Amino acid sequence: MKTVLVIEDNEQNLYLTRFMLEQQGYRVESALDGPAGIAAALRLQPDMILLDIQLPGMDGHEVARRLRSHPALDRTPIVAVTSYAMAGDRERILKAGCTGYIEKPINPDTFINDISLHFSRPQKVKGPVQILVVDDIEVNRYFLETVFRSHGWTTVAACNGAEALALAAKAIPTLVIADILMPVMDGFTLCRKWRADARLADVPFVFYTATYTGQDDELLGLSLGADLFLIKPLEPDALLGKLRELLVSHRDGLLRRNPSTAGVESSHLMQYNAALVRKLEDKMRQLEVLNRDLEQRVVKRTSQLEAAQQELEGLSLVGTWAAPHCVVGPDPRPIWPGPGILRRPAGNLH
């Protein structure tokens, strides 16, 4: 029977979590704050820790850091349970040492399946691991570096393929993970040059892209010598799992790469050009849609402004006619302006 330690200060959340886990045969232990949770983790050595981030006193980030400082808990899955939704929260959670997170409110239909993904303990990669991250978008580099460092790997980063080759010339990384659409030197060109360099040819190479997502793109990437072709975004655990498997396979000599691409340069060039054309066509279609949308919004906004202008003009005319037709003096009867003199009309005015 697997043991799950739940560190949660909200009694209703704790009750719901305990109920769902016990229904599935898990043994559940609990703690209501950070210090008690750390003590329970050291005593119980649980198979998993579910950690609320918004704890009183010592918050979940600090609890995770302290749990990870104990060798006995170094590989224990720590899953954050959080209602945070601000940009950067996920990165902070992973950097603190959590292996993943589940958002509140908990969905009873998916909760058990979500946490079961964290129970698997893949074979650990032995020795130091340095990942070369290649992406022209800073936030993407930061996210990947945070994920890898939280797992104990070191990282170096490059903005494009040319920078990546320069860094690899100084120190050969354990693995390279690269975007494709980048300035100066794109990922396809980087992969081709990487495999052509005798010093780098054996280093595992991974494409991680959100732009080149078609089957033809994947076939081209693998034919150039990539070991994996991954589509963004992947959950951190899924990404780490795939990279771990790749590194273990590489260590054990189990990688099966495509045959040498020597002598087929012209074929790859044709495929590469075709991929670029597809992406340019996609971008053109996206721009056309955006332009049509912009034109419609401009027409609508212009119509609204014209209507507002007409309304203002109407109000101005009303103000002009309402002004100087009579003057009220000390006498309660109005005094009407005449040509050259002021005269009071005869009789009573009603």
Image (cartoon, helix red, strand yellow):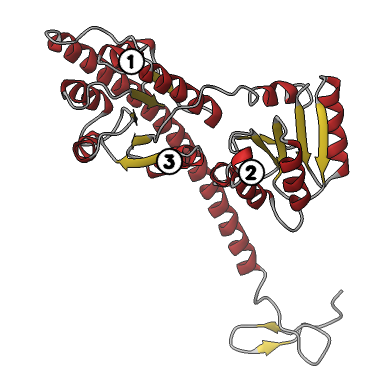
Question: Distance from label 1 to label 3 (Cα)?
Answer: 25 Å
Q: Secondary structure at mark 1?
A: helix
**Position of residue 282 in the picture relative to residue 68 (left or right):** left
- Which quadrant: the N terminus? top right
Q: Which mark is residue 145?
A: 3
**Residue 155, percent across and down?**
37, 41
Q: Residue tagged by mark 1?
A: 217
Seen in the picture, residue 245 relative to 4 is either above or below; the reply is above
Q: Amino acid at mark 2?
A: Ala
Q: What's the distance in space between the residues labelled 2 and 3, CA to CA?
A: 21 Å
Percent from the top left, x then y, of residue 257? 30, 11
Kindly identify the residue that appears in the image at 48 percent across and 44 percent down: 302
| Whether residue 104 is situated above or below residue 229 in the rendered picture | below
Residue 336 falls in which quadrant of the image? bottom right
User: In x, y percent, where is residue 43?
Assistant: 76, 41
Q: Residues within 10 Å of mark 3 (few under 14, many from 20)?
A: many
Q: Is residue 267 left or right of residue 108?
A: left
Q: Position of residue 78 (x, y in %)?
A: 65, 36
Using the rendered view, name the quadrant where residue 192 is placed.
top left
Please tell me which of labels 2 and 3 falls first in the chain: 2
- Of mark 1 and mark 3, the one earlier in the sequence is 3
Task: Name the quarter where the C terminus is drawn.
Answer: bottom right
**Identity of the amino acid at label 3?**
Glu
Q: CA distance from mark 2 to mark 1?
A: 33 Å
- Disc number at residue 85? 2
Which disc, if any, is residue 159?
none
Residue 239 or 42: which is nearer the viewer? 42
State the residue lying farthest toward the bottom.
330
* Left or right side of 62 for 290: left
Tell me what residue is drawn at x 67 percent, y 69 percent.
322
- 2 or 1: tag closer to the N-terminus: 2
